[in-house]
Amino acid sequence: MASEESEWLELSTPTGGTIRVLKSAHPRARRLRLTVTPKGARLTYPNGTHTAQMAAFLRHHADWLEQKLGEFHLDATPLPALKVGVPTSFPFRGEEVALDWAEGAYPRVDQHAGGLTLVIPKPHTRALMVARGLLATTFEAQIRRDVSRWLPAYIPVINAAPTALKVRPLKSLWGSLDTRDRINLDLALALAPPAALRYVLVHELCHLKVRNHSPRFWHWVETVFPDYKEQRAWLRTHGSGLKMQLDRLVADVAD
């Protein structure tokens, strides 16, 4: 393990490798928390936590950490950066679409059969930031349209409804349900096939009935969405790529 002063901790894995984990103190943290994103692993800890305690925590979670990092394919070829005026492509609702640029009187996104066109006035000193904001808004609007179509069918079956819906980038989750029954969905789900988004929505709706992942919970999920295992497996296989795509397209503007 690294010294107390280092920002990084090093963990020897069961398979003989070494994982670097970024450590980060948080004034409101009450416990050690390990997260994995396409950018790597991070250990958040309360102020005053000794390095030995962090080391023991990481060793206890070594198998899980190595597995999660493997799912993110961190050795994959980096995605091309989003650049103003440079066409690119990305997955949207499970289909590869083209993204191009045009000049117009006001910023907007034009959706068409071939993909999306970012319309940006020129000259515009903040064109890239504006483009990212437009994409984030487009992705959120698509998720909300889909959810609004599906909810009326699911609410009577579950006999419960969320109090609100929030769509934003989530570092390692696809969705969550808070203590006030508000559903959070990952913005990257706009890039996934609609069936994958539908599974995550049903997953969180079923938490309105069962707040854990017990057999009873999964019985609810299967009752409402029989093909859930297929979509869960798809997200495990392709999800890290979606999160990396979202990061390059919208960066931090949608946080």
Image (tube, rainbow, N blue to C red):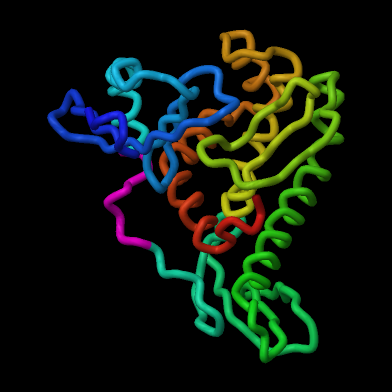
The one of 176 and 34 positioned closer to us in this rendering: 34
**Which residue is at 41% across, 47% downward?**
38
Q: Position of residue 29 (x, y in %)?
A: 55, 24
Q: Is residue 254 above or below residue 165?
A: below
The one of 162 and 112 positioned closer to us in this rendering: 162
Q: Position of residue 148 (x, y in %)?
A: 83, 44
**Left-right relation of 40 to 176:** left
**Which residue is at 66% across, 54% downward?**
254
Magenta stretch: includes residue 211: no
Q: Position of residue 130 (x, y in %)?
A: 68, 72
Question: What is the quadrant of residue 7 in the picture?
Answer: top left
**Which residue is at 53% across, 60% downward?**
91
Q: Is residue 186 above or below residue 109?
A: above
Q: How many marks?
A: 0
**Left-right relation of 253 to 11:** right
Question: What is the quadrant of residue 114 in the picture?
Answer: bottom right
**Which residue is at 48% across, 24% downward?**
47
Q: Is residue 4 above or below residue 139?
A: above
Question: What is the quadrant of residue 215 in the picture?
Answer: top right
Quadrant where the image shows the N terminus: top left
The one of 46 and 239 positioned closer to us in this rendering: 46
Q: Position of residue 224 (x, y in %)?
A: 70, 24
Q: Which residues are magenta?
A: 70-78
Q: Is residue 64 above or below residue 216?
A: below
Magenta stretch: includes residue 72: yes
Main secondary structure of the magenta stretch: loop
